[in-house]
Amino acid sequence: MFPGMGGVGGRGGMNPAKMKQMMKQMGIDVKELKDVQEVIIRTADSNIVIENANVTIMKVQGSDTYQIVGDVKEVPKELEIPADDIKLVMEQTGVSEEDARKALKSSNGDLAEAIVALSSA
């Protein structure tokens, strides 16, 4: 955690209890969350899923910092098409629900673009 304090190359390290005591004196409190199964970070485009996660929380002067270690995978978010949009495209173009959904997905949810694409097909 602190450079030069760990044991590297057989030079011996600081006693973990002493390290914890020093950190406490500096106002740093570290604890590990138990039984964490996964951590999910949601972004606009995807979800970052960290499985088999080890989570450590370090509290310094009232601020919490989370350190997460685990198996990371990024899952792209799928475009959610509202039922009302599908219905509108179906009414305007006379296509099936499946075709309306496909057109909306390929137009990234743009109603006008989906209707024009289906109307000109």
Image (tube, helix red, strand yellow):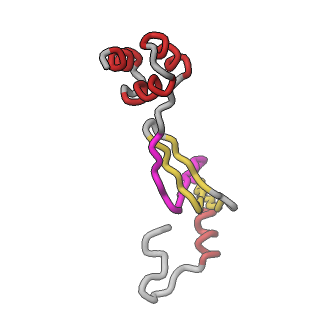
Residue 12, percent across and down? 50, 86
- The question of residue 62 being in magenta is answered with yes
Residue at the extreme right = 35
Residue 84 sits in which quadrant? top right
Q: Where residue 90 appears, x then y in whole percent?
A: 48, 16
**Residue 26: horizontal and vertical position, in percent?**
58, 60
**Which residue is depicted at the point 53% across and 23% down?**
82
Relative to 76, say whether 115 is above or below: above
Q: Residue at x 49, y 49 (%)?
A: 48
* Main SS category, magenta section: strand
Q: Residue furthest top?
A: 92
Q: Quadrant of the C terminus?
A: top left
Residue 47 pos. (x, y %): 49, 45
Q: As drawn, is 42 to the left or to the right of 116?
A: right
Q: Quadrant of residue 38?
A: bottom right
Magenta stretch contains residue 8: no
- Looking at the image, is 116 positioned above or below residue 99? above
The magenta segment is 60-77
Identify which residue is drawn at 33% across, 20% down. 117
Q: Residue at x 50, y 67 (%)?
A: 1
